[in-house]
Image (cartoon, helix red, strand yellow):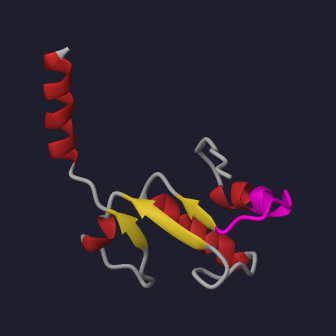
Amino acid sequence: MVREIQVTPGDLSLLIKSIVESGIDFSAIIAFSDMIARETVYALDRLDYKVPQYVAVVGFDNIQSKLMFPILLTTISSSKSQMSRRDVELLLKK
């Protein structure tokens, strides 16, 4: 089961808390970016959901390779320049 949640400005911990309190059993959260993933890990930790023991958290953009953080994060690396070039190529073909 996948549940998509819009990211809105504000306190991400309130959103994570509402997910936990909804009673839906979940085993992973895939975040739009590594920064959101880190906020998610922090919010889960405050609710006694330990990562990765209870919940897996994955980020998307691999900024952790450029910044030093106290915890390791599973992240998906993407080349924005390569993706942009490929998008333009696809549009030009159309």
Q: Quadrant of residue 83?
A: top left
Q: What residue sits 27% from the left and 54% below the top?
A: 78
User: In this orientation, does residue 10 appear?
Assistant: yes
Look at the image and tell me in which quarter the C terminus lies.
top left
Residue range highlighted in magenta: 17-27
Q: What residue sits 42% from the left and 72% below the top?
A: 74
Q: Residue furthest top?
A: 94
Q: Is residue 63 left or right of residue 31?
A: left
Q: Position of residue 45 (x, y in %)?
A: 66, 78
Q: Position of residue 27 (x, y in %)?
A: 66, 69
Q: Is residue 54 left or right of residue 83?
A: right
Q: Is residue 83 left or right of residue 49?
A: left
Q: Is residue 88 left or right of residue 63?
A: left
Q: What residue sits 59% from the left and 65% below the top?
A: 40
Q: What residue sits 57% from the left and 81% below the top?
A: 52
Residue 5 higher or lower than 93, as above or below = below
| Along the line of sight, the residue nearer the viewer: 62 or 67 | 62
Q: Position of residue 59 (x, y in %)?
A: 44, 62
| Along the line of sight, the residue nearer the viewer: 67 or 90 | 90
| Along the line of sight, the residue nearer the viewer: 39 or 32 | 32
* Numbered disc total: 0
20 part of magenta stretch: yes
User: In this orientation, does residue 38 appear?
Assistant: no
58 part of magenta stretch: no
